[in-house]
Image: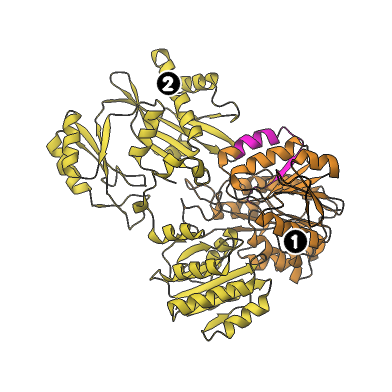
Chain colours: A yellow, B orange
Amino acid sequence: MNIHEYQAKQILARFGVPVPRGESASNPYEVYDIAARLGGKVAVKAQIHAGGRGKGGGIKLAASPEEAEEIARAMIGMTLVTRQTGSAGRVVRRVLVEEALPIKKEFYLGILVDRASRRPVIVASPAGGMDIEQVAAETPGLIFREFVDPRVGLQPYARKKLAFHLGLAGSLLSETTRILGALYRVFEENDASLVEINPLLLTESGALCALDAKIVLDDNALYRHRELQALRDFEEEEPLEIQASRLGVNYIRLDGNIGCMVNGAGLAMATMDIIKIAGGNPANFLDIGGGASSDQIRNAFRLLLSDANVKTVLINIFGGIVRCDLVAQGVVEAMREVEAAIPVVVRLEGTNVEEGRRMLLDSGFAFTVADGMKDAAEKVVALAG
Amino acid sequence: MTILLDENTRLAVQGITGREGSFHARQCLEYGTKVVAGITPGKGGTKFDGIPVFNTVEEAVAAEGVTATLIFVPAAYGADAILEAAAAAVPLIICITEGIPTLDMTRAMALITESGSRLIGPNCPGVISPGKCKAGIMPGGIFREGHVGVVSRSGTLTYEAVNELSLRGIGQSTCIGIGGDPVIGTRFVDALELFEGDPDTHAVVLVGEIGGTDEEEAARYIREKMTKPVVGFIAGRTAPPGRRMGHAGAIVSGGKGTAAEKMEMLEQSGVRVVSSPTDIGAAMAQLLNAS
């Protein structure tokens, strides 16, 4: 789960990581008040779940509360397009107003799970404030990594090593190691999959401060963090994807016109691929899971049809544990309920396949029954036109 | 010979009295697997379809000589169930459970790598040595005994691949679903090593997907060590970056872990890479005829 910058900074502050003084607001008058309290010189930052805000016009500096209010008036409600939002962009509903700090130097700190070593890894770089992937590609010598044994956590020696790599020795050594320790606790105690500070700022007065922050939480661990569940922002999510998560199915909306309903994530991806190879464009990724009931299939199918872009549907089920007759029953019921005149290509394989196919053909709806994945993809692409 | 499982495997099922556990324990029994014990804390001393149920894995191992365990417990207890099995020195631990928190798995893996146990999964369909033993949730009917090893990160896509093989009369030695999570116990390289060392496996099918670098590691191993022919498929060529495609591990992030990258590396390592799972059977038939 993604959370906003202002929420991430509240968590960081709670664990003792210094962040700029600031508050979030959804109204320009509030922004004026906050800016006035902070002394007038502030940064106004659009709160959306996507990076690249600076270049897209989502981060602006104001010299006075009046200017801050004016910036906020333009920013709140605007559709912000960045390299991470896609062309549709995101509507800005909230801004973070923070004191503007004089920058002396910028650093990068990140913690994530390294899949290769199967351990958390701290990534640190003295080249902060830039796209870290670009730094890694162009100047790999400026990226330092410390792998952590999760049973003992980030030990003091490892924190010191990182601090020296960053050139934060001398009077800043103890503050740097303290921040690294706090950051690891943020990662561990919130079950994060990513904690990132970019940049960590060294101010003219010699203080360290997290100027920007990003935290991604592990969805699988949210059950044990009630307080973090409340940070979910439904406005940032695709409505159909919210519905899908309630139904317990995996759905991701894409921009094509061929709706796909598949059991299993791998097969769902392969189905999208084969549609593309056949010259079509998938409207979605939809994995109904391994043990889907006919009810769940009915709901998932209705969900898929509520996307107005969908012109045809491909159902690809390899029924091992899911019985094909139950799939057929769910699909037929959904077709009856929505009274859809949409052409549907069905490919069924596995347990009770004959019964499932017969139910589809006897239903009175114009199902096209396909023989194998390739055939199904070609048929559905032809129907999509 | 097969790898991991054979007719002598003595399987325990952790969570045997739950909905999933009971259904699949019966399916495994029906396939001919020697399911010798069930574990459900608090139900020790009872029976499940004639199978003795124990409170702990340790008791099950002592009483029934368990050699492998299949885990169906809820995600919140998944890592604990894995560690319990490892503490009881069960050589093979197969975890079907989906949704285990990643940090739980990093801690569990740190202990597993120091134990003598091998972990398959989590979030996987399990392992099957056709005709001998099934320890997983795959539909037994589509598999045939034979000499092709199959290793895959996905469930139903494995069935698709196996079906393509079986329809052409190409049987399988062992099929391993390694799982779709970012942190898993057995990775492609580990499975390939086992297949390379198994005289009854003549060729291998590798089914990968976007995310991570396990396929790249596999490509390196194949290039440097593998003597047996490999057919490969990678799912997710059309997946948008930054989105998790169902599996927690299937995500293209920071331009890394793309299908194109993986396909290219496998191809350069001599793998016969196919663009559709429906071509796996034909490609394997060709490779086997040529060798």
Residue at image position (47%, 67%) is A282
Residue at image position (17%, 47%) is A73
Q: Is B125 in the magenta?
A: no
Q: Is residue B60 left or right of residue A181?
A: right
Tell me the mark number nearer the camera, choosing from 2 and 1: 1
Question: Which chain hosts label 2?
Answer: A
Q: Secondary structure at mark 1?
A: helix
- Res A165 visible: yes
- Res B148 visible: no
Outermost residue, top side: A170
Q: Nearer the viewer, residue B40 or A29?
A: B40
Amino acid residing under circle 1? Gln
Q: Secondary structure at mark 2?
A: helix
Q: Is residue B145 left or right of residue A296?
A: right
Residue at image position (27%, 49%) is A93
Quote the CA–CA distance across marks 2 and 1. 56 Å
Q: Nearer the viewer, residue B162 or B124?
A: B124
Rendered location of residue A295, percent (x, y) = 53, 68
Q: Is residue B201 above or below residue A116?
A: below
Rendered location of residue A221, percent (x, y) = 52, 43
**Crowd band around label 1 with a 10 angstrom C-alpha radius: few (<14), some (14–19), many (20+):** some
| Disc assigned to residue B27 | 1
Residue at image position (29%, 44%) is A55
Q: What residue is pinned by disc 2? A: A176
For the C terminus of chain B, give its image quadrant: bottom right
Q: Which residues are magenta?
A: B105-123
**Crowd band around label 2 with a 10 angstrom C-alpha radius: few (<14), some (14–19), many (20+):** many
Q: Nearer the viewer, residue B184 or B253?
A: B184
Amino acid residing under circle 2? Thr
Question: Which chain hosts label 1?
Answer: B
Q: Nearer the viewer, residue A316 or B169?
A: A316
